[in-house]
Image (cartoon, rainbow, N blue to C red):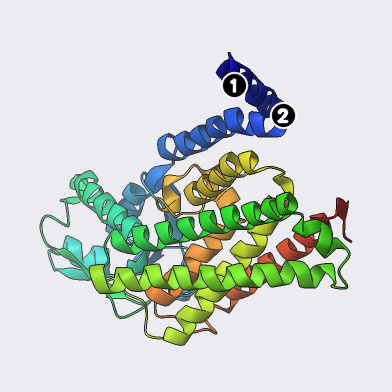
Amino acid sequence: MKTVAMMLKDLRLICRDRFGLIALLVVPIVVIMVVASATQSGDGSKSILFPVVNEDQGPVATALIRAFREHLDVREVSRATAQHLVAEVNDAPAALILPPELSKRYLAQKPSTVEMLTDPAQWRELEAIKVVMLLADRETASLGDPFSQELLSVKERNITGDNVSFSSLEQNIPGFSLMFVLLTLIFSVSLALREEEVWGTSARLSVAPVPPASLLGGKLLARLVVGTAQLLLLLVFGHFVYGLRLGHSPVAMILVATAVVASMTCFAAVIAAFVRTREQAIPVGLAVAFVLASLGGLFWPLYDLPRLMQQIANALITTWSMSALQDVMLRDKTLIAISTELLVLVGYGLVSFLIALRLFRYGGEAHS
């Protein structure tokens, strides 16, 4: 009977924490719905941007572009725009340049070479484009199937770095590293604040002559140091064990890792402000981490997501973090070249810190 009485007492305590109970039951359902939508309702290759420079304007070029459009988001652009989309903003994994007199040479049974400007860092999308090119080969049979006759050959040229090929490791190791760092930060910040309330530390700090910004900032700086070390250690482990590329600039890698972890740390403080108990921290932390990871390109490339989710992903901290890491690791970009990502991450962290500071509570009252 004592065991049953103890069980009933604990059940009453659990039921009193309504938010924690709801989070325990509803949050996993939300995560399952998000992941299921991301993996089953993607637009596939139709969402891959494929710029084409049509300098031929002949029947062969027209037939090829028509075949590409059935599977890709084809846009006819100038050569300068194509290079910009592939090399500078990285919106497209590749661009195809159809040279002048392509149709004329083909109809005269003379071979020609088409150039494809590539960003191998987007290797999954690039592989999808190559598959579509094989399909276009078959679908242009009415014009003599140019690729199979070897009248057209494709010359690839990497315009984003020195490396010509990548593997799934370049997606999985950084992606899972970011997810574990984010998960660790959310748990550590949330649980640390709750433990201070249990131990009475928060009550003593509420009357201490220390500004709230200094209190919160000091705690987050400690997590920043640990999180940055964790992220760098995971990436270095991937480098020495699996040959993961880390880029040419250790300074750029360290600064990017610091900016990424700083933004995640401040974001974790916002999540911690809404978590009132240790029981709430676990489901909420898992939900936030998995949703951000699945929508932010940490598990799979963004083109696998539905268009609506791709638009949402553009505003997520994980998307910008993954982009910054890949720019340094795979595209060998300089700090100036990734200044946009760094500014966004710093801005994300600053806004999150101000929000967390506004919601930050010591002694039961919010500090403003």
Asked whether the viewer can see residue 169, the reply is yes
User: Residue visible at 70% across and 72% down?
Assistant: 218
- Say which residue appears at 58% left-offset and 50% top-offset: 311
What distance separates the C-alpha of mark 1 from that of mark 2? Answer: 18 Å
Relative vertical location of residue 303 with respect to residue 103 in this rendering, above or below: above
Q: Nearer the viewer, residue 158 or 263?
A: 263
Q: Earlier in the sequence, mark 1 or mark 2?
A: 1
Q: Say which quadrant the C terminus sits in.
A: bottom right
Can the viewer see residue 78?
no
Label 1 packing within 10 angstroms: few (<14), some (14-19), many (20+): few
Task: Look at mark 2 in the image and give the residue it sits on.
Answer: 18
Which picture quadrant has residue 224? bottom right
Q: Residue at x 39, y 44 (%)?
A: 44
Q: Is residue 329 left or right of residue 197?
A: left
As drawn, the residue found furthest toward the left would be 149
* Residue 105 in picture, x, y percent from top left: 20, 68
- What residue is shown with label 1? 7
Quarter of the image for the N terminus: give it.
Answer: top right
